[in-house]
Amino acid sequence: MGRMRQATNILRGQLGQLELQVLEILWSQPDLDAKAILAQLNQSGPALQTGSLSTVQSTLERLYKKELLSRSKSGLAYVYHPTTSRSQLLARMMGEVIQQLHDGRLETVLSSFINVAEMLSKDSLERLEKMIALKKSVESKPDENP
């Protein structure tokens, strides 16, 4: 029988829909304050009820505490900037899932990637192959600074 896992949320740092939308805005337009972010959310349509400025400020505070945003004072308001890129966040979240579900065998992780790869287009698979080749070539080069 496999090792016992605690009954916890798979993604301890799970992000809510509003948090993800705020990150999307800040990835495309860094250094905005809460009022500007609220205006952007309201322009994006009725898909999400953002509520009030205080809701957005609470969301920004949660993202700041999760260390996904940095902030600096500009007048009376904070201006927010993402501390991680979309790809870095995705890698972190994937790492958390792998850590929670990993059974100690590399084959399990690799077969999961293959299952995902089956959903990719031919062009995407070719890009993936190029990225893997580049990663291999970078890692195989000897360190030039002894």
Image (cartoon, rainbow, N blue to C red):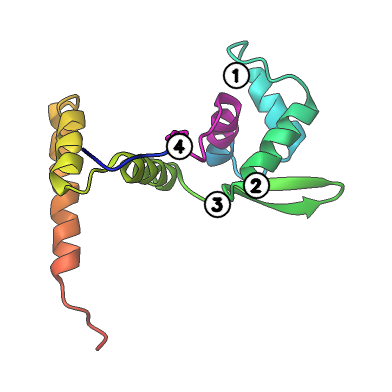
Per the model, the C-alpha gap separating discs 3 and 2 is: 9 Å
Give percent across and percent down for residue 94. 35, 41
Q: Is residue 52 left or right of residue 3?
A: right
Please provide percent x and percent y for residue 95: 35, 46
On screen, residue 38 above or below 145: above
Q: Which of disc 1 and disc 3 is earlier in sequence?
A: 1
Name the front one of labels 3 and 2: 2
Three-letter amino acid code at disc 4? Leu
Q: Residues within 10 Å of mark 4 (few under 14, many from 20)?
A: few
Crowding at mark 2 (Cα within 10 Å: few <14, some 14-19, many 20+): some
Question: What distance separates the C-alpha of mark 4 from that of mark 2?
Answer: 17 Å
- Residue 121, disc: none
Residue 83: give its label. Answer: 3
Q: Residue 37 or 20: which is nearer the viewer?
A: 20
Instruction: Tell me the kind of residue under disc 1.
Output: Ser
The residue labelled by disc 4 is 11
Give how far apart the Cα atoms at labels 2 and 1 are: 23 Å
SS at mark 2? helix
Give residue 44's mark: 1
According to the picture, the residue beneath numbered tag 2 turns out to be 64
Q: Are marks 4 and 3 in contact (CB under 8 Å)?
A: no
Residue visible at 71% across and 27% down? 38
Please state the extent of the stretch shown in magenta in the rendering: 7-25
Q: Are marks 4 and 2 in contact (CB under 8 Å)?
A: no
